[in-house]
Image (cartoon, rainbow, N blue to C red):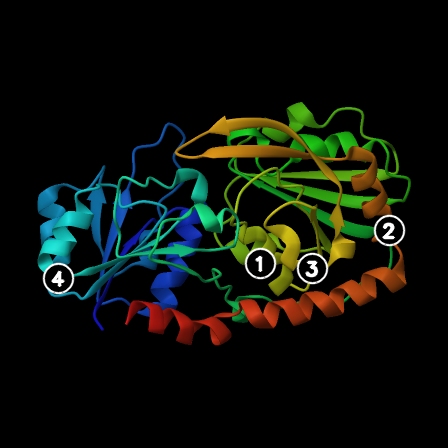
Amino acid sequence: MRLGLIARADNRGLGQQTWEYHRHLKPAKTMVVDCPSAQPLPLRLERYPDATVVRGLPTRQNLREFLRDIDVVLTAECAYNDELYPMADQAGVKTVLALNYEFMDTRVKPTLWLAPSLWHYGDIPAPKRFLPVPVDTDRFTPQPAHDGPRRFLHIVGRPAVHDRNGTQDLFQALRHVTADIELTVKCQQPGYVTRLAQHIPPNVKLRIDEGDVPNYWDNYSGDVLIMPRRFGGLCLPVNEALAAGMPVIMPNISPNEWLPAEWLVDAGWCATFRAKQRVDIYSANHHALAAKIDQFTDTTFYTAAKVKAADLTKGLSWHTLLPEYQKVLG
């Protein structure tokens, strides 16, 4: 099987996802798309020493050259030029689209839709397959618990539409936290978190870490990830935090049912928006979120959660899932 990969080379989610595809699936050909962006992050082309780099969106000629001498194309979220699918069909090349449901465009016809979770799985056209996005567990060294206040982490990344990662909900909840805690908030957009971080109680020691961290696995220092994510089927920071030995606090909404029930907090519907698909937005109950943060400061509860995090990680690792990807792409 000769694989062609369409990749990104920055430190946003698609960049991390396709970088790990490249490392583990070892494509015969790689095309890195340098998309126009109003707020670009640095390109890290050294990750793809064998790649063809396309500045802007790929043309038909770019696609024609890319499709030559390969059997299957893997791309995440989109193809950057919808002509890929009919051109690949004509060339006898299979196309696998690792989708994000909110940006799923049913006008295109890949050979296979690859879903990272069961979120809206019934709304995805056939042929389709559910297959989680693996995490490279070899990149992480789980840290033992330490003496002192429990250390929490929240990953904003580049702020997404409708506060996708629930940063505003988190800061509202902090007003109701009673335990002494430390919280680190990481964001790639300078100034964004500072504007939200108002009325922090004295028992919460807040650290704001802005900027682009070269290696994503270096983000995960601490004990527990707080991710009150308001919508979305794929959240790479959750998988990565588990690999770093960190339990995760999330809202009790789809597709978070695979996490232990005692890590989840009540959430209510608050709005709907439309990207390519209609998406419901949920807001974590602020008091429930605060109570869950307090609960994770209990040593017995936290120790049991760390054991469950390690068990969940085994099923998410590239060691476990690589054979499944090879079957899907073969």
Vertical order, 135 against 78 (above or below): below
Sort mark 3 into few (<14), some (14-19) or many (20+) by Cα contacts within 10 Å: many
Query: Between disc 2 and disc 3, whose residue precedes?
Result: 3
> On residue 259, which mark appears?
none
Q: Which mark is residue 295?
A: 2
Disc 3 is placed on an element classified as: loop
How many marks do you count on the picture?
4
Amino acid of disc 3: Met
Residue occupied by mark 4: 92
Residue on which disc 3 sits: 246
Name the residue tied to disc 1: 239
**Percent coordinates x, y for residue 130 in the rendering:** 45, 60
Res. 218 image quadrant = bottom right
Q: Closer to the camera, 326 or 41?
A: 326
Q: Where, by quadrant of the figure, is residue 268 drawn?
A: top right
Residue 318 coordinates in the image, percent (x, y): 47, 70
At x 37% / y 46%, what residue is drawn?
Answer: 77
**What type is the residue that disc 2 sits on?**
Gln
Mark closer to the observer (2, 3): 2
Label 2 and label 4: CA atoms lie apart by 55 Å
